[in-house]
């Protein structure tokens, strides 16, 4: 049975698994600690038998005009565990946290071509706002 929960300051080894398994990078322990110590950074993990099999990465954004909002940056599940409701459960958990904290909105960006992601977001209550948005990036900074 898998467990869905927010990683805490004590979960450096689980965060290390995410970095190494999903990003194929060497984990930087100091960076992981800094990230997990932030109250505005969220990692929701699906853990089965002490192994992370899925995660959701989100950031709480401060606003001066309204309540804060949540930006979901990434959702990923190990290929062999997909289509088992793990993504849905992680979205439900971040939604529960947002409701508990009184946040005004959750938003995310994806590509129309990412059909599985679009299906996940639509079936969990997400709505595509418009077809006119353009994403600008400033790279190499």
Image (cartoon, helix red, strand yellow):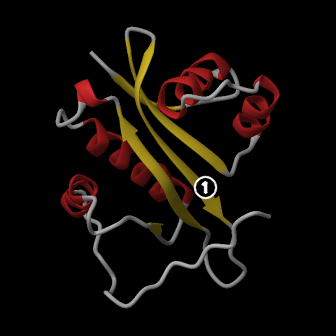
Residue 53: image location, x then y, percent: 38, 24
**Residue for point 79% across, 36% down:** 34
Quadrant including the C terminus = bottom right
Query: In the image, is residue 134 above or below residue 3?
Result: below
Residue projecting furthest to the front? 140
**Is disc 1 placed on a helix, strand or loop?**
strand
Quadrant including the N terminus = top left
Residue projecting furthest to the bottom? 132
Which image quadrant for residue 54?
A: top left
Say how many tags the image has: 1
Is 111 situated left or right of 106 in this image? left
Is 119 situated left or right of 105 in this image? left
Residue at which label 1 appears: 59
**Residue for point 30% across, 42% down:** 87
Query: In the image, is residue 8 above or below residue 139?
Result: above
Residue 124: image location, x then y, percent: 24, 57
Is 77 situated left or right of 8 in this image? left
**How many other residues sit within 10 Å of disc 1, few (<14), some (14-19) or many (≥20)?**
some
**Residue for point 72% across, 31% down:** 32
Q: Nearer the viewer, residue 58 or 22?
A: 22
Query: In the image, is residue 122 above or below residue 116?
Result: below
**Residue for point 27% across, 45% down:** 88
Residue 51: image location, x then y, percent: 44, 14
Residue projecting furthest to the top? 49
Residue 95: image location, x then y, percent: 40, 54
């Amino acid at each position: 049975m898998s467990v869905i929960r927010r990683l805490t300051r004590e979960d450096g080894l689980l965060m290390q698994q995410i970095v190494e398994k999903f990003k194929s990078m060497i984990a930087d322990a100091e960076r992981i600690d800094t990230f997990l110590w932030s109250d505005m950074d969220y990692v929701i993990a699906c853990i089965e038998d002490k192994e992370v099999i899925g995660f959701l990465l989100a950031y709480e954004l401060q606003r001066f005009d309204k309540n804060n909002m949540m930006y979901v940056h990434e959702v990923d599940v190990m290929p062999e565990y997909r289509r088992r409701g793990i993504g849905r459960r992680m979205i439900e958990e971040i939604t529960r946290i947002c409701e508990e904290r009184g946040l005004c909105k959750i938003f995310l960006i994806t590509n129309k071509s990412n059909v599985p992601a679009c299906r996940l977001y639509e079936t969990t209550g997400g709505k595509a706002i418009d077809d006119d948005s353009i994403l600008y990036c400033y790279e190499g900074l």
